Image: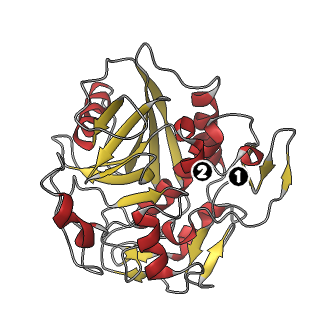
Amino acid sequence: MLKRILSIFVFSILALSTITTTATAQGQPAQAPGQIRGIVITRDPNSPLAKKFASEVGSTPTQNLIYHGGPVMHTNKTYAIYWVHAGYSVSSSYSKIINGFFMNVAAASGISSNVYYAATQYYDTLHGHILFKSVFGGSFLDKNAFPAGDCTDSYTSLCLGDDQIQTEINNVATSHNWSRSGTEFFMFTPNGVGSCAAGYCAFTDYCAYHSDFSAAAGDTLYANMPYADTVPSACDAGPSTHPNNSDADPTINLVSHEHNETITDMHGNAWYDKFGNEDGDLCAWKFGASLGHTAYGNYNQIIGTGKYYLQSEWSNMFSHCVLNGY
């Protein structure tokens, strides 16, 4: 999300950042692999990124996404990596519920009644429209020790740089011989672990982001998924939005955002608006009407056998946010 925010802010932070980034003018093709292009801004309306988004787009987006000539993911495979070293933790059933979400998305492939189907209106010039066809490749509990953090954030004692996250994803994917083609790797870190990239930090500026990097095994698509309820006020829409009674619920909302954006803008040069916002960005924290509620919280999506509370996604066909179909 907001992948071209650096064109305005990067000059003031580049010397301080440990991440190499390249500013690009809004509306131009994406940066090279390895530079973050997707950020879910936090819920704080007073954050610099939230203010910038509001000044560009306003409270009710009207500007459709524009095709910039790059590829989309016609089909996709996902892997989940849970990097949880001793001394850190995730809530009970965290990985089970998230894995279940990926499996349900795969089982619901092609069904128009959920938010993922909105992506099928987008296309590229090589292979035509996106097919809602997802496969869950599996997950891995990574118990490797965290390296010494190479950044500092306001909320955690351990802050990982984007380069460190990329390195661990590459190590895990390589050790399992996971194919990179048509695949996105989701890196989940535990409660109390932060991260920074391009001068912005988890829970202060963002809740998650997606990008890609070059590796010997091939271009690697990934999403950095900090533990949302490390700072609930920043990255959780509230306890009434936890239909599974788990800290996994707010993280799954962010997963859906990043997954859909990677599908429609895998290299940052396919579908985004004139300001650089992707399909998830224009509808971030916009949930629409609920379908019902479990004993624990509201849900607005039934995907496979699961019930979830997910943000909507942008539809060019209707020029507004949707929760199913177009």
- Which x, y percent locates residue 46? 49, 63
Badge 2 vs badge 1, beta-carbon distance below 8 Å: yes
Question: Which is nearer the N-term, disc 2 or disc 1?
Answer: 2
Q: Residue furthest left?
A: 15
Q: Is mark 2 on a helix, strand or loop?
A: helix
Q: In this view, does 28 lie above or below 23?
A: below
- Kindly identify which residue carries mark 2: 253
Q: Is residue 247 above or below residue 281?
A: above
Residue 230, disc = none
| Residue 32 in view, yes or no | no
Quarter of the picture holding the N terminus:
bottom left
Viewed as shown, does residue 123 lie left or right of 121? left
Q: Is residue 237 above or below residue 294?
A: below
- Which x, y percent locates residue 213? 23, 49
Q: Which residue is drawn at 85% across and 49% down?
A: 293
Identify which residue, 157 or 78, lies in the foreground: 157
